[in-house]
Image (spheres, coloured by chain):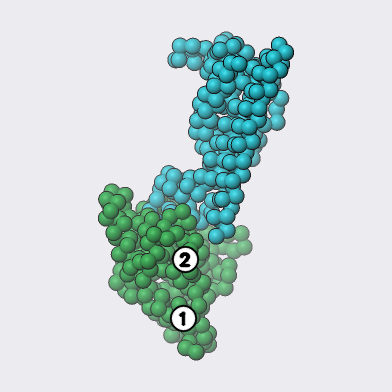
Chain colours: A cyan, B green
Amino acid sequence: MDWGPLYLSLEAALMATVLAGLAGIAIGALLANPRTPGRHFFDAIVAAPMVMPPTVLGYYVLVAVGRKSALGGLYRDVVGSDLTFTFHGVVLAAAIGALPMVAKAARTAFEGVDRKLLAAARTLGAGRVRAFFTIAVPLAAPGLVGGLMLGFARGLGDFGVTLMVAGDIPGETQSAPLAIYDHVQAGREHSALLMSLVLTLSAVAILFAVNVLTARHTRSDER
Amino acid sequence: MTLVVAAEVARRDFVFKVDLTFDPGITCVLGPSGAGKSTLLGVVSGLVAPTRGRVALGDEVWVDTATRRTLPIEARHCAYLFQHLALFPHLDGLGNVSYPLPRAMPRAERRERAHALLTKLGVGHLARRRPGSYSGGEAQRVALARALAMTPRVILLDEPFSALDRERKRPLIALVRELVTELAVPTIAVTHSLGETRALASRVVRMAQGKVLEDGATEVILADAGHDDDLAPR
């Protein structure tokens, strides 16, 4: 059995989590600030990929960063390869799936931080940036980590957007979910079952870890 | 140095409008809920932006809406003891008290100074413990140590002793008086308690609906106010 697609998925999901983490935590912090104008509208935009058909989302991405698009051309000029139908496309697809999970979790986590603590930090001589990194981020950390883990799990399991943006090229862009689809189509039931079990166990393990983390955080809040 | 607050803030229920000066020493601000006491502290600290007016400490202008000047909150060096203390739950006693110390100072020196302050306030044993495990009085002392760690230019106390019982209140009031005398900075203490006011301040400002009703010596303003017994020996 070829475990290559699983490694490719893991690698892409890890890189996507880093990208979605950086963008999602920043977006979550902005959305959690009551002074951010139009934040409920932007929240809806950020969360939309969670409820949109993956093919529609994939189509938008393909149009936005495809070979003939301005962004796609710029990417090729800078990086030297195309974004679509390459491993980079798999990472982008996974990141798009992970972003709303991370941003939503980050917003909730930052909203849970007592704003009086941030005000206290400011009166104690901290600027906005220092107050954010020394007070808001550590206090929101369990929620942020939970969001990153969910984002990783989401990235690991992406099918539709990956297929649209990166295709299903064995050894290059074929992720584990796509490989399972191919195994089923080709009648390789054993391989499909094994890879499905690995993905299922990963998802359950991640959700269990998120639950434990949340429960610990809740207990420490109650103390 | 004298603190000047001549400011107006449009609140939901009333218009806050004061013209006050505070010399070094403790001034107690009395009034019912919604009188504008916390707004006053907010305007001085920078947490509330006045709609119109001016706040200055000596020659340094902190806010002047006419010239659109606003000194950032972090540059004012206002020690603000919040009613709910706002101790950082993820930091231990040393972490909390060393937070306002300059980051240019070596870490070991910061922690040493923080420890000295905690010890001075009688809570040196809390250096390595987090706020979740403190009693009400201990938390109050750590918060006071943290507020004073920055060498404040103004001290703001919002219901500083409200969470304490009579036995714990008396020594802490004496300690605050001693520290303010030592620092010689304008200090505004918001309280509901006449007993605390008598024990703390030589000047009282009474407020209601965002306006100053009375401003004068404690014994004059409180002459007819009766006595609450929250500090009286039993």
Q: Position of residue A64 (x, y in %)?
A: 59, 18
User: Is the residue at mark 1 from the same chain as the one at mark 2?
Assistant: yes
Residues packed near mark 1 inside 10 Å, few (<14), some (14 to 19) or many (20 plus): few
Chain under callout 1 = B
State which quadrant residue B122 falls in: bottom left
Q: Amino acid at mark 1?
A: Glu
Q: Secondary structure at mark 1?
A: helix
Front position in the image: A41 or B170: B170
Residue that numbered label 2 is attached to? B134
Q: Residue at x 59, y 53 (%)?
A: A218
Q: Position of residue B29 (x, y in %)?
A: 47, 73
User: Residue B61 shows which numbered tag?
Assistant: none
Q: Which residue is mark 1?
A: B167
Closer-to-camera residue (A197/B85): A197
Chain for disc number 2:
B
> Callout 2 environment at 10 Å: few (<14), some (14 to 19), or many (20+)?
some
User: Mark 1 or 2, which is nearer the eye?
Assistant: 2
Horizontally, residue A194 falls left or right of residue B160, namely right
Mark 1 and mark 2 in contact? Answer it, CB < 8 Å: no
Q: Residue at x 62, y 21 (%)?
A: A176
- Distance from the alpha carbon under mark 1 to that under mark 2: 17 Å
Q: Position of residue A7 (x, y in %)?
A: 54, 21
Q: Secondary structure at mark 2?
A: loop
Inspect the image, locate mark 2, and give the three-letter code of the amino acid beneath it.
Tyr
